[in-house]
Structure formats: structure tokens, C-alpha cells
Image: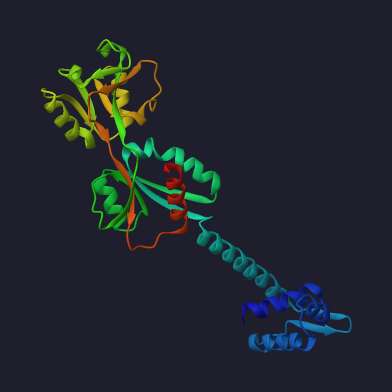
Amino acid sequence: MDIKQLRYFLAIATEGQITRAAKQLHMAQPPLSQQLKLLEEELGVKLVERETRGVVLTEAGHLLYKRAAHILEIMESTTKELKELDKGYAGTLSIGAVASSGTTFLPFHIVNFHKQYPKIKFQLWEGDTNKILDLLDTGIIEIGIVRAVFDSKIYHSVDLPKEPMVVAMCKEWNCGENTTQLKLEELAEKPLLLHRSNERMIREECQEKGFEPQILCQGDDMRSLLVWANAGLGMAIVPKSAVGLVPSNRLLYKDIIESSLEIRKAIIWLQNRYLSASARNFLEMILSDLS
């Protein structure tokens, strides 16, 4: 019993007459009658009773009619899903991102992508660059957003725009005469709140300016650092895209002038590995937005 035989039987059962069923199927009556006979012989049961006006389903015929309709419905929906999957209209897109990108860079692009491909679901993984690379290597994710430290012989990459860093502080910690900018040296002796991935860069920059930073806290969540800054525990140095991540009337943000503090990130994916259509579509959209 194959799909073609099930389609033939459904047509006969629906029309109640082999002649009309043959016309619906655009075939001659004798071959259709032969297919019905072969199906009955294969199953070892009688599926229809032939009468002068047509055919009537037997008990076995009624059961096969229900099951055949269900099977063909599953086949059609599966075929449709596979085609949508192949074109990137459906499926699951797995992305990994360093923590700051998961809350700042990605949401805008995910919203735009979701508008174009509403059937796509998402798996988001966050961590440091080493974790994202490991997730890529093991095939858990297809696309990663990482700090620009990776082996270009293994990964394809697209650099994202460099992002400057800013200082977030509550009004009580406000320092400097300028309302929108400050010099890095003005943070000397101030309690600093840093994302762990940025600690080395910030420490080296401070040392170049002639002072050792007073790091009160290192954390893995940008929002937590901003909440601490809002509570008055210290001054958070964060990427500029984090501005407004924690709604507050108490927080002030100031650019750091005369400083090379900036975040360099890239979108990467493995060379010589299959990318799903949804991943290809997402990358195409990102590249279009960046151009």
C-alpha cells in the first residue's frame, strides 16, 4: 500500500463511484478499478461493495477511509513544513551572544527578523566569548556574536561597529564640570563597577593614565551593574548601547573623552559547516542593515 493507492481509494470513497473518481483523478476507469482490486488483495479485505449506482464502503473501507485521510493530511502538512524549513520560513534559529549583545544589539534585529519570518523560533545562549565559541564548535548554535578574539581560519566573520564605553552614575556620584563627558582620570579613587570581560582593558587604560582603578565589583550582567550604580554603590563603565537598559531617573551617563575604551565585536559562524536557511536569512538581514 502506497500513497498513490491511498489517494485513489479516497477519491473512490468520496465520489462513491469509480467513474466519477477516475474523472477527478484524470485517468481511465479500468486502471483505477485495477488499483482498487490490487489494494484489496494486498490488504486481504474487501473495501467496497459494488452496486448498480456505484460503490458502498464496507466496515474495513470506512476504517481505511478515516486513516487514509489522516495519513494524507500528515503527508501534505509535512511536505509543506519541509519546504518552509528549506526556504527558512520555519524552524528554530540558535544564536549565541556575549552578554551585552544579548540585551543590546540582538533585540532590535530579532524583532525585524521576526516580522519577516514569524514562524521562526529562537534559542538564545549567552556567555563569554570562549563559551560562545564552544557552543559553535559543538553545533549547539549556528551563529555567534563575540568579542573580536577568535581564529579567522576556522570562522567566517563580519565586524560590528566599534562601540564606545560610557560611565553610569547616580547623581550623588556625579563628578566633573561637564554634564555629558568626563576624563578617565576623574574616576581615580572612585569605586568602579565593571563587566568581567572588560576588566583587563579598563585596568590597562587606567594604568596608562597613571592610576590604579578601584574596582568595587566585577559582574557578568550589565543590568546588575547598572542597578548597583543606581543604588549609589559605585560608577559603572558599560558599553554605550547599555544606556537606558535599566530605566531610572537617578542614573546619569557620561562619555569618556580622550580614551580608547571601546568594544570590538563580530558576528561569526563556522567555515565548512552547513548553515540552515533561517541562519542564512538572518545573516543576510544583518549584513544588509550594516551596509
Left/right placement of residue 228 relative to residue 120 reads left
Quadrant for residue 194, please give it: top left
In the picture, which quadrant includes the C terminus? top left
Q: Is residue 19 above or below residue 258?
A: below
Q: Residue at x 81, y 78 (%)?
A: 23
Image x and y of residue 290, in percent: 42, 42
Q: Is residue 46 above or below residue 151?
A: below
Left/right placement of residue 96 relative to residue 279 reads left
Left/right placement of residue 204 relative to residue 249 reads left
Q: Is residue 99 above or below residue 268?
A: above
Image x and y of residue 91, in percent: 49, 56
Image x and y of residue 37, in percent: 72, 88
Name the one closer to the observer, 126 or 34. 126
Q: Residue at x 23, y 37 (%)?
A: 197
Name the one closer to the observer, 137 or 78. 137
Q: Is residue 202 above or below residue 150?
A: above
Q: Residue at x 67, y 80 (%)?
A: 5
Name the one closer to the observer, 234 or 16. 234
In the picture, which quadrant includes the N terminus? bottom right
Image x and y of residue 43, in percent: 64, 85
Q: Residue at x 19, y 17 (%)?
A: 186
Quadrant for residue 153, please give it: bottom left
